[in-house]
Image (cartoon, coloured by chain):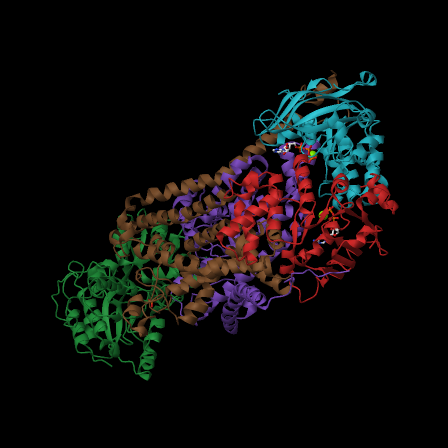
Chain colours: A purple, B green, C cyan, D red, E brown
Amino acid sequence: MSNPEGDSLDIYQRADRNIRESLIGYALLFCACVSVLTTIAIVYVLASETINFFGKVSVGEFLFGKTLNNGQYTCTWSPQFADKNFCVWPTVNGTFIVAILAMLVATPLGLATAIYLTEYASPRISKILRPAIELLAGVPTVVYGYFALTFVTPILAKIIPGLSGFNALSAGLVMGVMIIPTIASVSTDAMTAVPRALREAAYGLGSTKKEVATNVVFPAALSGICAAIILGISRAVGETMIVAIAAGQRPVLTLDPRQTVGTMTAYIAQVAKGDSRVGSVEYQALFAVGMTLFLITLALNIISKQISKRFQETYE
Amino acid sequence: SCGGGETPTTPTATGAATGAATPAATGAATPDAKPTAAPAASNLTGNVTIDGSSTVAPVSKAVAEDFAKANPGVKVPVGTSGTGGGFKKFCAGDTDISNASRPIKKAEAEDCKKNGVEFVELPIAIDGLTVVVNKENTWAKCLTVAELNTMWSPDSEGKITNWNQIRPDFPSEPLALFGAGADSGTFDYFTEAINKKSKVSRKDFQPSEDDNLTIKGVQGNKGGLGFFGVAYFEENAKTLTAVEIDGGKGCVAPTAENINNGTYAPLSRPLFIYVSKKSLARPEVKAFVDFYFKDIKVVKEVGYIPLPEAALPKILERVSAVKTGSTFMDAPAGVPIAELLAKDLK
Amino acid sequence: MNASDSQSAEKQSVLVAENVNVFYSSNSPAVAGVSLEILKNQITAFIGPSGCGKSTILRCFNRLNDLIEGCRVKGSITFNGIDLYDPKVDAVAVRRHIGMVFQRPNPFPKSIFENIAFGPRINGFKGSKNDMADLVEKSLRSAAIWDEVKDKLNESGLALSGGQQQRLCIARAIAVEPQVILMDEPCSALDPISTLRIEELMQELKQKYTLVIVTHNMQQASRSADMTAFFNTELSDSGKRMGKLVEIDRTSVIFSSPKQTATEEYISGRFG
Amino acid sequence: MNASDSQSAEKQSVLVAENVNVFYSSNSPAVAGVSLEILKNQITAFIGPSGCGKSTILRCFNRLNDLIEGCRVKGSITFNGIDLYDPKVDAVAVRRHIGMVFQRPNPFPKSIFENIAFGPRINGFKGSKNDMADLVEKSLRSAAIWDEVKDKLNESGLALSGGQQQRLCIARAIAVEPQVILMDEPCSALDPISTLRIEELMQELKQKYTLVIVTHNMQQASRSADMTAFFNTELSDSGKRMGKLVEIDRTSVIFSSPKQTATEEYISGRFG
Amino acid sequence: MNNQNLDALGLSEGQSSDSKFDPKLESRQMWGKIFAYFCVFATLLGLIVLAFLIFDVVGDGSSRLNTAMLTQYPSRRPLEAGYRAAILGTFWMLAYVLLLVVPLGVSSAIYLEEYAPKNWFTELIELNIYNLAGIPSIIYGLLGLGLFVRGLYSGRSVIVTGILTITLLILPPVIVISREAIRAVPQSVRQASYGVGATKWQTIRHHVLPAALPGILTAVIISSSRGIGETAPIVVLGAGTVLFDPKASPINFGALFSGRFGDVFTDTLWSNDNFFSVLPYQIYEWVGDAKADFQTLASAGIVVLLVLVLGMNLIAIFLRNKVS
Ligand SMILES: Nc1ncnc2c1ncn2[C@@H]1O[C@H](COP(=O)(O)OP(=O)(O)OP(=O)(O)O)[C@@H](O)[C@H]1O
Ligand SMILES: Nc1ncnc2c1ncn2[C@@H]1O[C@H](COP(=O)(O)OP(=O)(O)OP(=O)(O)O)[C@@H](O)[C@H]1O
Ligand SMILES: [Mg+2]
Ligand SMILES: [Mg+2]
Ligand SMILES: O=P([O-])([O-])[O-]
């Protein structure tokens, strides 16, 4: 039945074009692999020094502290002192105190911002406000650190007795402000992804705006919001300059936010700026702490990704 | 720093330099010549690499800054690997000049020897630490080394928390300690002087890499006590009180005079640069070292105490004659500089 | 009102629109000059080509258009004699009495039970826990879906099939005891069997409620509706497209002997 | 081939599908066992309820399904006797000869001129700048849109109205001189007037090209198509939904005396 | 018409005769208002803090906000010191980071969005990029320290190490945001292009990239503005704080043109004595200096940095709004 056309059809493969197309594909793939190499390099750099570190300090001591000869249990972090201790918890403690404070600020404010932007503000206003808020994330952190130390701490000192010159509180508050856009932005995306139909359904039943926002949109976007919060924690945990400048450098096991604390990142920055010799145990401790920080943030990122992936599946 | 290894001071041309080239290696320039006032561009080129003590680094950086104006072709990166780290590189032949906040150790000297690195040892300044308290602190005018030790000893951690535990007639006022960050040369030196061993200290003090923050801490705390370089105190003399130190020979104030004549003990020490003999043969290194001592008044600007007048000619002679070896190695503390310079090199 | 039938006089008008114009941000109305009455316990169908403003008018009835920025309504719409657009009237309260079912089933991502209980709860349902369970059951029964879901009230509403979801949405609307239920193309996302079930359900619901449905499917209108309103797009004097009500009458009249030629052309498939 | 008409024997088949099954990632086919012929210079319409696989089959004809991850085609489709799925055949080249117009008008976000010129250019159009201008004009004329856009060839294609955009897309397809033009619900996003213009245009185009259109609108099929294929969804043995070709015949036959009852039911609006 | 409805519509709240429901409209609406005010407050709070921050910094640094601050090299004397080297360092770094990040980032984004088949490897790359984007910058500092400073440049923190570190740091966000821009290009545009017989690359090159360009630019600008504001990794690398040779470039053109081919790569960006300084690090140094004048200078530097970073952000916002 077929009856080929008079003019021949050039629908067959052409080698030159195929080669060009696949070369382009490989070149692009190569570029995409740079990021994989980056990860490998990070793990390699961190792991190699960390292994050296654990050649000198036991994993047990690093994670759980040690029991002294007199039977007393101790967990302190003091690699730079003559009496060296390598129990990482005080730095983790400092990190999380500041991070928790920051999240106490950033979570309600960031979520309220997201709700305002998605549910209340007109598209025009939210188009202006959203980038304005994102500017907060663009401010270099050294500026926040300076602001916390020279502006916030003196004000807080007037209100709160017993506030140390360097303290977790002021660093945490300012860091919270820095993290607002992270939480606001990711949750705004999550809330915008909630179909308009759900909102209309709720309005159709006689809900007020607030009820729609809190009873329908918020729960529907919950996993996206969780992802935002975890991402915020991960930012807070990894933040360096604010804590290095404003929170102090003394890792202690304390829950008092008025105290000086020493975070993991502050330790890294401090040693990096200091005089520790390459190859010394305090230098290697730098990488062990870096590795710990890497693993913590990695875990947080993976959790956040998993949660938001599930969320996306619900609405796509 | 452990980080970069070298925190560089790399002076280069600003294009502002005018005038004829200065003959580089005369070593006989007028002592009053102001390098900043009359910059004269030389046509020297090359690098002078410096590493070592972070305590000494500010002096070398300042000299490098001035040197750069006259010698646009020469770069002088100044690293801060610490005295020990600096010697390690120096004795491996990697650097031209090593900054040191203590004399070279025997083991390090042997290291150098093994690698065929001969060096010229040049004291450049004296470092003194001031112990400061809050303006409202009217009781602690003078503290003994033993009392300081009580405050700072590791055993005091969590226990000595009030001034009245230091001396019974002190008022009951919470003790708030501020100090240099545990990763600084100043901290090592203070602990060595007060607690007899470097890095031995209580840990519940407020550490900071920035002296500035120590100053703020003591300013804001009635029971505060901190320490830092003498020169920084002078800038903040209005808002802080310096404590006299009793090292066994009565209360001594941290004045330039007391530091210079060795009576302000144990919180003062000499600072050095060590120059490789091989490097000194290079014109740019020679020019830099000569310049160092022409510019030596920067020491004061940077915060240290200048060497006694009498010592300078001896040091310049070491340079011009390329006298290698050390007289300070393993010297006990408290011996005046001039005396040590006079000793035989070994 | 266009309806010529004498019967309509007996029937009570629940909603009355008079010369309604709806504007979306621009100055020319998207729908203009609509006057019609919705009769109690009747099914009124809105038909017409895409974009002629059927949904727009429907959404005016429960003030859902308030949520669209820049949308304004001119003219009057009364609900049992009360002007719906009186500033004193609270749109939130209006929507409880005039429920809505949407084109795509949109259950909340919650359990089936919660889907139904949500409305009564926010509206301050006074009963006990048991009363609530009864209310949920009653609503689900009314929407003819009870038997299918009674064993999985705690499962997500999203786990149901499309047709079941749509009936769930109807049950949800019923639970707050509205007087009118507006339905915007309730079957367009459903398969033929589910469509038939919803149509049967509508016949039952009209015993208790007043129904207004938008549909693209003329068969559906002719099968289900008592009254049919035909909307069309016309060009305004300034050349803008604008929705108009062409005529409203008893369904049998519209489908057998419409007064307007546009209606006849549309019905007979000559355009659209 | 189901066509019973004697005329069809005289007509040349451009595209022939034999027992085509299309799979989307899963192991059960989305469309199964489709065999049909597309006749030269005729308009063939695909009708059937939503999801029955009309678009899927259409997109097999120019291998646009290749772009969908996991989509596989079994069976044979020949184009002028050449097996389209022969590994030696380049899908990119196929698409030049079998053009496509989509449901929503999708002009490139570029000038009107560039919209048309892009295809010829990447296909190595050999002419001069003037030749290109001529080609653009010719294509726009063929798509009956030249008069409306000739003064604004440098303006963005997106600035046109929906109906104009769709004709622009047709012009764009024509510019690379295909033999077949596939159209997937080309009018479903358009108003009645634009729809009529496109329908008229199709009648002109079939003089030079072979057209295959998918439509939901039975009036459109009956007005425009020479041949009509009716697709439906059936349940496979394993209970999966699966598209099937129910019958293909001359349009007049399908609409007056279809062989299959499913076709009749669909045509008469008893479902869908 | 009938009283029940009057009640029901909220016209006579309080004496509801509604049997089953008690909608309590008034209190619900009041809570709604309070909630709305809180949300507005939260949204504005961040901006207020930003305003305070700028106000504070400008106030502190006002006495040094002059051109001398921009043209002077650093010095131990605060009044003679300025940010020239740091600004030049920042600009050099930015220029070369862009040179690396744009091709790498955009290529990766295109690969992942347009080419990548769905398999474990692509998924790995994707997950990996997402995770990299969330790793603290200081870890990148450690990477740069281990790989570039200690590895490539045997202990010298030269500008190349900074460039490479910051490039790796901002690459993941650039890829992630560029991907979104590419994904936002409607599928219909691609289909139209394929439909007229374009190849994949032609489709990308002629339609996808131009359409995604503003989004990609936004990605690059925002990410690189973050990059030049980063202090932590630079601290870890151990950058300098004193001077930088503004003549440095990847190639010593003087040598090239005068035929000294042996020197073409000496005294260049790649040479191992090109130490560098960048604005945020210089600021960090001076914030911590004991001399009060240095703190004034630090505030002035912060103003410069803020102008630079926020300016770049504003450009990006402008670009983004222009397209959407
Ligand atoms: N949110 C809106 N903003 C601006 N214009 C709108 C909006 N919603 C609808 N329109 C316009 O109002 C007119 C009527 O739209 P409407 O949705 O009421 O039509 P419809 O008859 O329901 O059509 P369909 O059958 O496609 O649902 C259309 O021209 C449409 O473009
Ligand atoms: N990309 C895809 N991936 C997976 N399944 C698909 C995809 N596209 C279509 N399908 C499925 O294949 C079947 C046929 O779809 P197709 O789009 O061909 O139907 P259609 O007849 O064109 O419907 P409509 O009239 O709604 O366009 C449907 O069940 C659909 O869900
Ligand atoms: Mg509608
Ligand atoms: Mg389709
Ligand atoms: O850096 P220091 O060697 O002086 O400690």
**Where A311 sits versus B127, above or below?**
above
Say if residue A234 shows up in the picture: no
Q: Position of residue A237 (x, y in %)?
A: 52, 55
**Front residue of B344 and E252:** E252
Measured as percent of width and height from the top left, residue D22 is found at 75, 57
The quarter of the picture showing ligand 5: bottom left
Depth check: give the residue in front, E298 or B88.
Answer: E298
Quarter of the image with the C terminus of chain B in it: bottom left
Q: Position of residue D80 (x, y in %)?
A: 71, 60
Left or right of A108, for residue C220: right
Seen in the image, is E124 located left or right of residue B176? right
Of E158 and C241, the residue lying toward us: C241
Observer able to see residue A6: yes
For the N terminus of chain B, the image quarter is bottom left
Total labels: the figure holds: 0
In the displayed structure, does residue B278 sit left or right of residue B225? left
Image check: E254 left or right of A264? Answer: left
Q: Position of residue A155 (x, y in %)?
A: 41, 41
Residue E323 lies, with reference to residue B290, above or below; the image says: above
